[in-house]
Amino acid sequence: MQPKKYFNKLVLGLLPALLFTFIAITANANDADSTTVATTTQNDSLTSNPWVIIFSILIVIEAIIIGYLLVTPVNNFETTNTPKRKRTLWERFNNFKSMEEEGSLDTGHSYDGIKELDNATPPWFTIGFALSILFAFVYMYRYHVVHSAPLQLEEYAIEVQIAKERKEALDKLKPPKVIDENNLVLLGASDIAKGKELFIKNCATCHANDGGGGAGANLTDEYWLHGGSLKDIFVSVKSGYPQKGMPGWAEILGLEQVEQITSFVKTLQGTKPLAPKEKQGELYNENATVDTTRK
């Protein structure tokens, strides 16, 4: 048999080893139990699967054999008239005929001087092919019939849930947010929407749903009785002005909801209420350091 023929056969022989390695890796990835994923996911590795190690060694051995055949002189494989020799273990394992018997295997086809021989398929290849079919049935039964292991989408859902639980656990370890007038920022859309709900429920009686004012001041213009900065509004809502009938909402709603109402009130600036109350207080300029112009 010519070196190129050996090379083609052995390259073909690498394919099942690669296939089994891929199957072993896939099985290792899909074998996570949903009840233990949280504690084992981080510790698992491909090297912990013995099948991966076995097939990796097999690939290395076959690659060494291929390299040996590539550097072996061609005349070592030519048929000679020497007496019939005993077949090697490798030839017996692969069910090869000896070189002296290769003439009986000649199919009559020749490509660029390379003859095609009708060698039988190696037994290990046939066994591996049969095992791959058996594995497919076992895989189908386990993952799609009895559902004894999670599929990829289920594993993803489990991992997302675990990540969510871990995040919640970490959030609990963080110190609580300190809310006061010295660390205020304008909140995002979701908090502003909650602030609007709280404003309509608790503040609209005096300031109207659209902030145009009534018994209380107009919150949509540039004039403010107690300052129009985010800090000023927060202090006003938090402490209130009992002498004017406005309670301190911090004791009623809590600082988090006061902060939400404050951010919503800030967004009312420049809007057009249906029945705006007349201007009251001082003109507030967001960009100025000092309020000016009292009406």
Image (cartoon, rainbow, N blue to C red):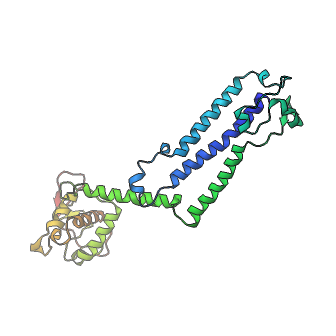
Q: Position of residue 155 (x, y in %)?
A: 48, 58
Toward the right, the furthest residue is 108
Q: Relative to 189, say whether 26 is above or below.
A: above
Q: Report the side of 77 relative to 38 (left or right).
A: right
Horizontal arrangement in the rendering, residue 17 relative to residue 273 (left or right): right
Q: Position of residue 132 (x, y in %)?
A: 65, 52
Q: How many marks?
A: 0
Q: Residue at x 34, y 56 (%)?
A: 167
Q: Quadrant of the N terminus?
A: top right
50 shown above or below 169? above
Q: Give coordinates of residue 131: x percent, y percent.
A: 65, 52
Please identify the quarter of the rendering in which residue 55 is found: top right
Q: Residue 121: x percent and y percent?
A: 76, 43
Quadrant position of the C terminus in the picture? bottom left
Tell which of 15 and 251 is nearer to you: 15
Q: Nearer the viewer, residue 43 or 268?
A: 43
Q: Quadrant of residue 118?
A: top right
Q: Residue furthest bottom?
A: 205
Residue 191 visible, this orientation: yes
* Residue drawn 35% across the image and 62% down it: 189
Q: Nearer the viewer, residue 133 or 246?
A: 133
Residue 229 seen anywhere in this rendered image of the structure: no
Taking the spot 80% from the left edge, 39% from the top edge, the residue there is 119
Q: Residue furthest left?
A: 243
